[in-house]
Image (spheres, grey):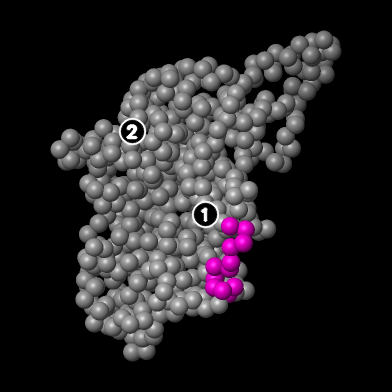
Amino acid sequence: SFCTLLLCSLPNTDVAMLRRTVFTRLNKIFSLEDAVKDIPSGAKLVVGGFGLCGTPHATLEQVQKLGSKDLTVVANNAGVDDWGIGILLQSKQIKRMVSSYVGENKTFERMYLSGELEVEFNPQGTLAERIRAGGAGVQAFYTPTAFGTVIQHGGFPIKFNADGTPAIVSKPKEAREFNGRWCVMEEGITGDFAIIKAWKADKAGNLMFRGTARNFNVPAAQAGKICIAEVEEIVETGELDPEQIHLPGVYVQRIVCPPKYEKRIEFRTTRKPEAADASGAAGGKKDPAALPMREKLARRAALEFQDGMYVNLGIGIPTLASNFLPPGMHIELQSENGLLGMGPFPEEKDVDADLINAGKQTVSYLPSSSIFSSDQSFAMIRGGHMDLTILGALEVAPNGDLANWVIPGKMVKGMGGAMDLVSSGCRVVVTMEHTAKGAAKIKKACTLPLTGRAVVDRIITDLCVFDVDKKGGSGMTLKELAPGVTVEDVQKATACPFHVDPNVTTMQYAGC
């Protein structure tokens, strides 16, 4: 190459001087203060992390000290009230959040509902792909996720007035049909700055991540005009194995290494070393009548698994179902924050803040485990590589419509990855209580904003099991009844008509 010929033609002293000049100009190591000092008010930040895992908290603290206002922050979620992006919400430095999930951040929810904060909700996989696309120079793309929902149709509040009326609402998005599937057009996202968290960096800016801390950090780094990487350790250039580098240095302009490092865990979830086999095999058969309702639902949901399946489980009851696998069965659990082959909760001695599931609970590896970034995680979901997803619901309709992410004006959790999962084409099973405070949750039509249109295959409740004809339009068929429950009991608790299978059976529960 020209550079090689130039170096070869120079005396040794000139070569050494040229190399020193190049490396000086490429010096990427900054103090925290210098790394953020040119972030102005009104800047757009793309921030990595998932829950508290992989969150660049020290750099965000420095942004808080800097005092930049009216920031737009693109991130999956905002951590918790006093950690991560949450501290910028508390100091009222953020004008708009572009996110998929509110989670446990009460400040986030309160500020949005009171009109103090603009929030643009995105399905988690769409958000990851918008960030990835922006960093890759892709201006827009089409996805089946969220077609037929308020995300496509528009009109969902981005900001409220003080009296609770909408001040700013989302705009409709273009939709087109490809190969028989309707898709929504989404635009790529870039930012003025990316702020991310990695494990190790070399002085050239090459990065390595640990565990599920990779999450949104990889696509976020690529989408910023200037990327600030907060790391735990800096090594000399050449010390990292090129085959082990997760993010090339071309994406990283500034590296910071805080003198002290703290990692928080949102939900420290462990198991006892002597814990018996939860399937019931170790302790004999369980009596369903003696089980809590949530456990009964989880045990019935476990019967949906088939050997060799790739499965994504929603937060709560669906996640519990993995504890009740029939003996000898093996499935691969996928967690959308970037883990395939999710193991059980760890023993206390093995807890790792860099290894969590989508519910922000600590988990463990299996021999078959693999780790990847959030954009790749949703590529495998959106691409139809999952066999089954089980998730909860607020409302379900007999045509398979599902609502599970928001109660307008009251409860805003965000859709997270649910919209991506239910639109992927895999089998969708809902587990939920049949009623909420006496009101039916299975209705002729959903009244809450939809998560997906005509997506549910089966509904498992504490009273019964319905199969849903989401494509043929013939409605729901009662397939199983819980012990002691009659068809009349189900009719009273269900706000829509349904068919009854002539061979309706009694519900069974794994390990019972």
State the extent of the magenta-drawn residues as a range: 272-283
Residue, x 22% and y 46% (percent of image)?
Answer: 409
Q: Sort mark 2 into few (<14), some (14-19) or many (20+) by Cα contacts within 10 Å.
A: many
Tell me the mark number nearer the camera, choosing from 1 and 2. 1
Q: Which mark is residue 335?
A: 1
Residue 394's x, y, as percent? 30, 60
Residue assigned mark 2: 96
Which secondary structure, mark 1?
A: strand
How many other residues sit within 10 Å of disc 1, few (<14), some (14-19) or many (≥20)?
A: many
What label sits on residue 152 in the rendered view? none
* Residue 228, picture quadrant: top right
| Residue that appears at 39% across and 45% down | 103
List x then y, in percent, for residue 495: 21, 71
> Within the magenta stretch, is there residue 212?
no
Q: Residue 413: give x, y in percent of width and height.
A: 34, 48
- Give the amino acid type for the residue marked by disc 2 in the picture: Arg
Q: In terms of depth relative to the viewer, which is nearer, 448 or 426?
A: 448
Q: Secondary structure at mark 2?
A: strand
